[in-house]
Amino acid sequence: MAPPSSGLQNPNQPNSAQTAPPRWTHAKLQDAQPVVWRASAFSIYAQRLKEDLMLAHSVDRDQPNLATSPQPVNSLPLGLDWKRWALSLSDDHIAFKPALPDRPIVVKTRTPVIVPPNAQVSLFVSLPVWVEVSAGKSASDLSPLEVFCTQKLSNTWYGTNFEGELCYALKSRARRSLEDLDDEPLRAVCRFSTRNRSEEALPLEKIRVAPEHLAIYETKEHLWTTSLNVEFLGKDLPSRVTYESERPGEAKGGKLMREPAKSPKSASFLDHFVFKNLFHNA
C-alpha cells in the first residue's frame, strides 16, 4: 500500500508514469509528519515539530538499490540518533543536495595503470557523494543545516614527515569505458586524464583529488564532477595539475547541482608537490 500523501506536499512530485522520482529535490513538510529520503542503503529521516526540525539517518544494506524523493512514513525505525534544529514555523521546506567529502581523496587503483612515454589515458573514477540537507521558507530561500557522510572512508597521510595533509583513502577500479560504469545514486563520476610527456613509462597507482575544486552535475544516468587533468613532465619536475572549469562532455545538458567551493583555476603548491610524489611513491 502506498503511504498517505496528505502529510507531504512535494512540488516536484513525479507522475505515475515515472519509475524513478527525482533524487535531489525539495519538499514542503507538514507538522508532525515524518518523511524519509532514500538513496541505495542510505536513508535520511526528517520531521518538523512546530518550530523544530528533527533529522536522523540510517544505513540498511538489505534495502533495494533505489533512489527516491522525500516520502511520508507512518512509523520510524527504533534507535535513530536525532538532531534537533531550532528553526521557525515558516521554515517548512527541506531540500537534499549532493556534496563531496570535506578533505582531499587519494584514489588508489586496484590494478596499477602504466602510461607509456608520450601517451595519454583517461580514467573514470567514482567518488563518494555525501548529502547536504537544507531548510527554509521556500525552495529559493534555503540554508544548509547538515552534511551527512554516506560512506565511511579511511584516513591516509599524503606528503612527507614535514609537509603534507590528511586525506581520505579510496580504492577504485578506475574504468576506461563509460559502459563499465554502474548507476550508483551516491557516487559521482570524475574523469581523470593523464598525459605522460616524459621519456619513461609512468606507473599510475594513486590519484589525489581535491573535491573543493570540483562542481557536480546531474544527468539521467550519473552524477558527474568536472574533470581533472595532469601532465607528467618527468620525475624531477612538478606535474601540471588542472581542474576544469567547464562541465565534462559526458555531462552535456546536465543540471548543475553544486559549484566548486574554490575556484578550479587556482592550483596550490601542495597540489604540485603531492602529484610529484604521487607518481613515484613506492
Image (tube, rainbow, N blue to C red):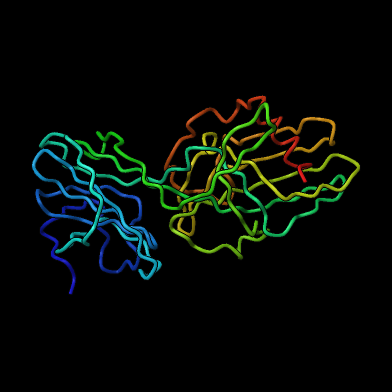
Near-viewer residue (143 or 102): 102
Residue 135 is situated, as x and y percent measured from the top left of the image, at 24, 39
What residue is at 72 percent from the left and 59 percent from the top? 111
Rendered position, 265 above or below 96: above
Q: Residue furthest right?
A: 199
Residue 69 is situated, as x and y percent measured from the top left of the image, at 29, 57
Residue 75 located left or right of residue 238: left
What residue is at 32 percent from the left and 60 percent from the top? 68
Near-viewer residue (230 or 167): 167
Residue 8 located left or right of residue 129: left
Rendered position, 66 above or below 126: below
Q: Residue furthest bottom?
A: 1
What residue is at 91 percent from the left and 42 percent from the top? 199
Residue 257 is situated, as x and y percent measured from the top left of the image, at 42, 43
Near-viewer residue (168 or 142): 168
Residue 263 located left or right of residue 273: left
Which of the 4 image quadrants contains residue 94? top left
What residue is at 70 percent from the left and 51 percent from the top? 122
Circle count = 0
